[in-house]
Image (cartoon, coloured by chain):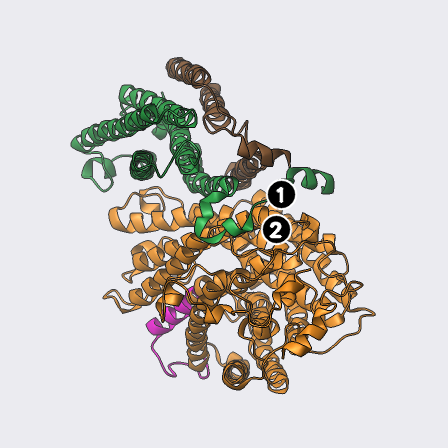
Amino acid sequence: MQQNNESHKPHIVGYATYIFVWLSLLALTAVTVTVAGINFGGITLLIAIVIAIVKSSLVLNIFMHIKFDDVVFKVFVGIAVLTLTAVFVFTFFDYLSR
Amino acid sequence: MANHVIAENYVDFYKEKGKHTGLGAWLLTTDHKRIGIMYLVAIVTFFLVGATLGFLMRLEMLSRGRTIMDPQTYNSLFTLHGLIMIFLFIIPGIPGVFGNFFLPIMLGAKDVAFPRLNLLSWYLYISGGLFAVVSVFLKGGPIDTGWTFYVPYSIRTGTDVSWMILAAFILGLSSIITGLNFITTIHRLRAPGMGWFKMPLFAWALYATAWIQLIATPVVGITLALVAVERLIGIGLFDPSLGGDPILYQHLFWIYAHPAVYIMILPAMGVVSEIIPTFAHRTIFGYKAIAISSLAIAFVGYFVWGHHMFSSGMSDTARWIFSLTTFLVALPSGVKVFNWVATLYKGSIELGTPLLFCMAFIFLFSIGGLTGLVLGALATDIHLTDTYFVVAHFHFVVFGGGGFIFFGALHYWFPKMFGKTYNEKVSKAALGTMVIGFMLLYFTMFILGYEGMPRRYYDYLPQFATLHIVATVGSWILVGGILVMIGNLLVALKKGKKASMNPWGGRTLEWTVPSPPPVENFEEIPVITHGPYDYEYNINGDSDKMEENYH
Amino acid sequence: MNKSAETIMTDKPVIDQHLQGEHEHKDPVGAKMGMWLFLMTELLLFGGMFLIYGTYRYMNPEAFHSAAQELNTIIGTFNTIILLTSSLTVALSITALQKGNRTLSVLLLAITIAFAFWFLINKYFEWSHEIHNGIYPGSSELTNRTNGEILFFGLYYVMTGVHGIHVIIGIVILSFMLAFIVKNKVTPENYIRLEISGLYWHLVDIIWIFLFPLFYLLR
């Protein structure tokens, strides 16, 4: 019943938190653009993807409140992301071994 | 329990005086029961259209060469038969009709979580159906790609593929919205005391189905949309002459379309799990195993799609991985079959029509499931790919499984939905006829396929003639059985005796409300204190007596 | 399984069931759940396209690299900043409404919509530039190139195009919310519709966070 009480008293995220997250997102964007200019060879793509994942988890957790919400929403997002990952893996079983 | 509802003068939902009257009371309703009935009308109509197309195809195959139509018409017929039966009958069938009508009642709720979205979903279904029908009469002619829309042919053919894709896209959206609605309903609107493991198994099955609808449908939506864009402006994504890979299309298509098979069969399994305990008068054997196996099927079923592509040029590694996962998904289905049979063991079985439908289901579905393993094994699949064996397997699973249970569910819940009883002698005879016709029609196809008869062919070699005649005669018997069954129900609708509140002795919540149910299902939301199939506990208790007075 | 399932699924609500039906938004958690489920389908819709992208990039690595040189990184970076900032303003708008400051909420929402338009205008100039250079599906310039480059630009137009459609839908939704706040249909006490519209807008942002490096930062 705990979550239910929470839904009656919403968790209000302060302006400062949002602005801090926004600044972090901008900083990460600067990093990803800069890094893309340097040739790291094979791991360039990996770096870009990792930064994108960090950025989107910031948006998910703070902007989209999932950190403060009912745990079931985290499970939902987890299911979607895991399914997508698994579909990539299974498809690449084919393409990597052609 | 909610026995209070049996007031002397309750208003059943057909007699509701709402904001709108006449046709508007139906077309503008947000009552889940009315929407369920509207789905029933539309879906049975499309089923009859699809069945007619199948009937005509079988008629064409009665003799070699031309019998009643030309080859191009035949190509269109098998395409339309597949599209209508899959997208307009079997996928929306049980969730649309019985899910809508009974899920809220079984959970002890007054409606689904989003009643207006529910109505929108019905309208999307109808518009998708209309687009599909319209596409047949456009100048390009009826689509001839097969229901799979395989590229590159679907990019090149002059028939109206894009319209049909639009129809499929809209139907997909309808399916997604229904799924979203059911998941939210199950999470949010269970009656007080109804924990997850006190839910009826039909709700569990719908829950698992809804997840597949949500996760798989968007992938096919965008894939088909890309085929339409490809036809329109030639982006090259699926066009081999521009570098596109047709096998990637097959991957994306089956990422949806294989889980879609479980959208077709899981709700049917849920219905069987309701009917069997009711008619065995015994609690279900292995409740949790059945509930969890629904989720397991939904999960594993997502990773077997490659078995549709064993002969398409996929890599060997991928082929054996997908073959392995295919064998794995047979396990949870097996768990269910054993649990149903174990439920019957030592039960006091009453051979009502719905139970006989379940018996037919278990028999036909087991044949379909086991032949699925024959196709899932790499070596035998190479021999059987694209033969009648596949057609037979698919029809045993989807028609013998999902289709038969759609009608089984209709016979089970007919008294509740319409407040009328039907003639059981006729319905049993109709079912027997259907099973005989079904076996003649589709079992013959296993033999034809094994001997090498390719599917989707307009003509055949002389040595296949006898079996083709047997199959066509089977189709006549099957159609005869279906017509008698539907006729029997229509007669019952007109002249049937009034049904009691709980004609079969069921234990789930829908049997605690009058037939047909009142406007908002329950006068007071019930409080759940026991499991859904608890035969130790008499749900109707005093109400049985009250009911006698009531009639 | 059982234990974890029970703990995950303890979201059992006690809702006044009389509030069902006509007043569906009276269950804010339910409404939010519906939106999250919808966002999952959006994620998988784009996921399908990312799968196509991944496969073709794996098959044509060089062609993807050389084709990406022709995209304008500066305009892409600029659009990223615009979308990130619009995500901030919509989040702030919800906080403002929660704290009872309707004027600030409306103002922030209007800024969000303005940013969304700005994004689309940049997109328009970017596409016009490409098309002016003769790079669009079916053009003679493009069909003379290698298969890998044709696929790259096919994906570029489709994926940023579908994303653009989502931006337009977002503008429509946010405009409705703005009107609702002005007309007092969305209030500091009942703001769930604004909240779930915000969720949708953030998803549009997340998609772009992935599109940006995959198309504009391939050097």
Q: Which of the labelled discs sits on residue B190, or is there none?
A: 2
Nearer-the-camera pick, B336 or B314: B336
- In the picture, which chain is green? C
In the image, the segment drawn in magenta is B61-83
Judge the density around disc 1: few (<14), some (14-19), many (≥20) Cα neighbours within 10 Å. many
Residue B51, percent from left and from top: 46, 75
Of the 4 image quadrants, the one containing the C terminus of chain B is: bottom right
Nearer-the-camera pick, C9 or C167: C9
- In the picture, which chain is brown? A
Q: Amino acid at mark 1?
A: Lys
Vertical side of A3 occupied by B499: above or below = below
- Residue B70 part of the magenta-drawn span: yes
Judge the density around disc 2: few (<14), some (14-19), many (≥20) Cα neighbours within 10 Å. many
Vertical side of C23 occupied by C136: above or below = above
Chain label for disc 2 = B
Q: Are marks 1 and 2 in contact (CB under 8 Å)?
A: yes
Q: Residue at x 44, y 47 (%)?
A: B218
Real-space CA distance between mark 1 and mark 2, rounded to the nearest whole angstrom = 8 Å
Q: Look at the image and tell me whether residue B310 can be seen.
A: no
Residue B99, percent from left and from top: 54, 60
Position of B328 with respect to A20 (left or right) is: right
Q: Amino acid at mark 2?
A: Arg
Vertical side of B485 occupied by C9: above or below = above
Do badges 1 and 2 share one subunit?
Answer: no
Q: Which of the labelled discs sits on residue C12, or is there none?
A: 1
Q: Which secondary structure, mark 1?
A: loop
Q: How many labels were placed on the picture? A: 2
Instruction: Name, please, the residue furthest toward the left.
Output: C132
**In the figure, what tint was chain B given?**
orange
